Image (cartoon, helix red, strand yellow):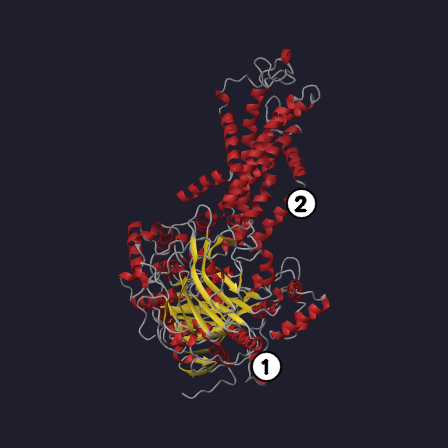
Amino acid sequence: MSGARVAAAALFVRHRPAGVGALVLLVVAALAVAAPLLPLHNPDLTDLANRLQRPGAPGHPFGTDHLGRDLLARLVWGTRLSLAVGVFASLIAALAGSCIGIAAGFFGGRTDYLLMRGIDMLMAFPYILLALAIVAALGPGLLNALYAVAIVNIPFFARSVRGATATIAHREFVDAARLAGMRSGRIIAGEILPNVAPVITVAMSTTIGWMILETAGLSFLGLGSQPPQADLGSMLGEGRKSLINAPHVSVVPGAMIFIIVVSINLLGDGIRDLLDPRLRAGALSRPAPVTRIERAATGADDAHPPGGALLQVRGLHTRFVSAGARAQYAVNGVDLAVDAGQCLGLIGESGSGKSVTALSLLGLAPSPPAVISGGRVWLAGEDLLGANFERLRAIRGRRVSYIFQNPMAALHPLMTVGAQLTEAIRCHRRVPRRAALDEAVGLLRRVRIPGPEARARCYPHELSGGMRQRVGIALALANSPELVIADEPTTALDVTVQAQILQLLAQLRRERNLALIFVTHDFAVLSQLCDRVAVMYAGRIVESGATHDILSRPAHPYTAGLIRCAPRLGAGRRPAAIPGLPPAADHRPRGCAFAPRCERARAACEAGAVAPARLSATRRVRCLYPLEAA
Amino acid sequence: MTAALEAWRLSKTFGGGRRWFGRARAPVCAVREVSFRVAAGETLGIVGESGCGKTTLARMLAGLLPPSGGRITVDGKDPRAGAGAWGGLVQYVFQDPLGALNPRKTIRQIMHAPLRHLLGMEAPARAARIAELFDAVNLRREFLDRYPHEFSGGQAQRIGIARALAANPRIVVLDEPVSALDVSVQAQVLNLLADLQRAYHLTYLLISHDLAVVESVSDRVAVLYCGAIVELADAAEVFARARHPYTRLLADSAPVLGRKPAPAAAGELPDAPPRGCAFAARCSRAGDACRRRAPEPVCTRGENYVRCFHPVETPQ
């Protein structure tokens, strides 16, 4: 896996503290390993004539302790011992804890119950008390201290590994392995272990420093290494007796413990950042409230909208830029216009840029990584991309609102539906709480939720998928917007519920003269609702016009293919496939992006950019050789 | 008709046991007495909304979940009793094509597993068979040394299909095989599945929520509601001439190009099916009998049936 190695190298370059930690640790470990080869005094040789020498004394750079032993030698040998104990304790804890965790997570049920209750019992004792009890039972000694520290840390490993295993054990590839004839032991070794290994590594890297501290603590109490053997904890314990008149005897091992633990923790943080999937997915980085805009300076003639439509988009470009990866060109020059009360269907496959277009209009595409690199968006003549955050906030949810695909994710799980609606209302208008709540109930009634007074007191998880999406629609309507942008609002719903939601949207549009941008991948759904269609492919609109015209006589070969390739109820035939795959977003072809999949493509199609051609007053197509019918 | 696969009064109940501490949990009936036969080379579509027990049924048929009651036979035999494992008879194509591939294994390692563990083939024979399978699903052989994340959904689903075929199964359970794919790629995969069925004489169980997909690919269709089959009919007729009011509702709700939307009916899938017909509460034709007891299957033609006291009559 050279990819992982490259990523690790990149981490240490970018994550500087982890790099420093790794470097310091490497030096310390090298010294410890090389201890027998270094020209050091015998660490256990007492020389009472030279006791408690200050650092810098001849022959003793760090001075001597209360028995006249060379502190440098004891420090190097003590570090060697402490590191070894920490690493071995960590390995033992990881091995035992992972075995328990994997068994509990994989087999579940009664096995899980018994194992985890055992772990709970271990955790019920304060850890240092438990370690003391174990050492007391086994007798003092470094090896016993090692066992005690390892046992105390088993629950930590068992619990994190169990959690990771339980998620992976229910993944489909584990079922697939079982269907491939693999037995449980082989599945654990081949399928589960490689996938929980990062969790184990992260747990180890974050606990090893802790374990060194715990071993030092036991030695400090005289329960770990026995005299004259030196480890950092026992050195500290011995130094304590002469803390006042010779502080260096305890400062030297103390500083070493500090250096080791800090460097291990810095390195551990780096490893966690590298391996933890949640951190890798950017869970800790919050997107900015407005998408970053990096537009080239535009001429004055571009500053005014070309027409009188409610929403106009001209030349919108959005790309995703993240360090160490190629830029993804999601939206590559989109022009749109929506009149008041009109419904525009924005259709395309996943990756065509339709959702990013919808989010970019109000600067909601998450930055980082999104960057709007060009274009203008006018709402009733006002440039939204140039607007400041306060202005945008006043527009979002008030004049333009969104309906999202997954209502469960769009609703706050800990707030009642009524409270969320009230919040949305009061965010934009100064309405007393009581009146806002009444208004919220009215909104729920308007989206045909039965028993709205009772439903307003429900939490989102208490509602069915269809009811949740109705709440999502009610939220979008809360401040009587002029434009609603609905991003695949029915894709996650069942077909009977989808029909209800589509009917509701159609009724609301008529009642309130609402303009709607309906983002979808399904022509059949779109045809139920929309007056106009814009077909997107590879970040561009390839065809736009009235729904009926496009469906009956598609001009762009891609539109025609998209209509043909969806199976049609009652048609009784196999759909015709479009060959090939949509282009990758990090690749920007010079000419038509669809040309490699197109039957009609000729040399000119790939040679240069294809400008949109006007077929009629309302119809545009971006094709050099459009289908005849249009 | 020689049944390649037969399910007889197959049921699955979740929960219901007692915890060690605490009260008994109410059992959830995910699949209730499902019976059907599928002929060799036939495609049976299973359609229903989320929560109707589609996936539970599919997992039982593939041996991934033990049934609470009823019987499954493959070629007249109990699949557990045979010499080979269940996986040698029934294979599964998963809904999430990437989730079904271990992210830490190469495609070659993934493809070797069924050949080695189910068929006990030697390494050279395995390599030859994998090459043959990759040709069959139109994948390039250099893909074998890549990791799953390097593939698009459509390619990953082809790999999933190749892996399912590697075991040389009689029956393939297709659990929403195209619903995670792009529209333009869906048709490619559906056509590939049809070609493979002809070439290898496979029996398919196609599970989907998409009526149009089910209708276009299946020979017969079973409509599932609240864990029970409410109607089993030929694909050409099941939606065009629906007998069960629920099938009718599904067919009317599905958006169709160029068809004006029918007025949507209210109501959603109940959490716990009531006594009697599970659909009665949403049904305009329901009478007293519907709410008192569950209707028995009424034979319509051949092995097709409908479970309804008041089926919709449409002219032939």
User: In the figure, residue B72 lies in which quadrant?
Assistant: bottom left
Residue B216 in sight here: yes
Numbered label attached to residue A124 = 2
Q: Where in the figure is residue A173, as x and y percent of width and height?
A: 44, 56
Which is more toward the observer, B278 or A203?
Answer: A203
Q: Residue at (64%, 21%) from the top-left corner?
A: A249
Q: Where in the figure is residue A570, as x and y percent of width and height?
A: 40, 78
**Dot 1 and dot 2 within a common chain:** no
Judge the density around disc 2: few (<14), some (14-19), many (≥20) Cα neighbours within 10 Å: few
Q: Give the residue pinned by disc 1.
A: B291
| Label 1 residue SS | helix
Q: Name the amino acid, label 2.
A: Ala
Considering only vertical position in the picture, is A411 above or below B256? above
Q: Residue at (47%, 64%) from the top-left corner?
A: A313
The answer to whether B174 appears left or right of B245 in the picture is left
Q: Where in the figure is residue A600, as x and y percent of width and height?
A: 29, 67
